[in-house]
Amino acid sequence: MSKLAVVLLSDMKESVKVEMAMRFALVAQQEKLLDDLRFYFFGPGVRVPGQILESGSELEKVLQQLLNSGMTTVACVYNARQMGEAEHLQKAEIEARAIGPELTRLVADGYQVMTF
């Protein structure tokens, strides 16, 4: 069983990493080779949805594709609160919850973790 968690730790200061993370996750989802694929906004990565939506970035389309793909997509609620991003996540309709323990469980359950 192949399972992958993509964790975005970068914000738009490293836009290439942001784009690579989202595009990679979309390609992986389209290929349908993995039994489970999840995408996490963690640490500075929780800023990305707000940064994209406020800037009118060309990555807005990619973000919407990611959110509409059916892939589990979650942001860390604690990071979002700390960085003042909770409202942006709500606007983008991204679920926010405590993901630190969840990531630990995923590793214990055999998921590979890929960070950007």
Image: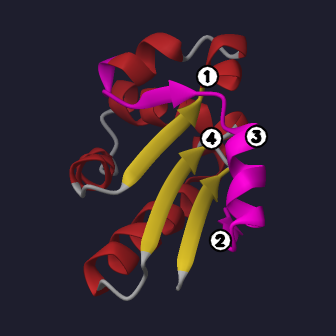
Which marked residue is nearer to the observer: mark 4 or mark 2?
2
Mark 3: amino acid: Pro
- Residue 105: x %, y % from top left: 73, 53
Q: CA distance from mark 3 to mark 2?
A: 14 Å
Q: Disc 3, disc 2: CB below 8 Å?
A: no
**Mark whose residue sits in front, 2 or 1:** 2
Up/down of 113 relative to 47, above or below: below
Which residue does the numbered mark 3 point to in the structure image? Answer: 101
Could you tell me how far apart the alpha carbons at marks 1 and 4 are, in whole angstroms?
12 Å
In the rendered view of the protein, which quadrant contains the C terminus?
Answer: bottom right
Q: In the image, what residue occupies the spot 65% across and 12% down?
A: 81
Q: CA distance from mark 2 to mark 1?
A: 22 Å
Q: Which residue is mark 1?
A: 77
39 is within the stretch colored magenta: no
- Is 104 positioned to the left or the right of 21 in the image? right
Q: Is residue 71 above or below residue 42?
A: below
Amino acid type, callout 2:
Tyr
In the picture shown, does residue 33 fall above or below 38?
below
Residue under label 4, please give it. 45
Q: Earlier in the sequence, mark 4 or mark 2?
A: 4
Q: Which residues are magenta?
A: 91-116
The image shows residue 30 at horizontal and vertical percentages of 26, 78
In primary-sequence order, the first of circles 3 and 2 is: 3
Q: Secondary structure at mark 1?
A: helix
Q: Nearer the viewer, residue 9 or 11?
A: 9
The amino acid type found where label 1 is placed reads Val
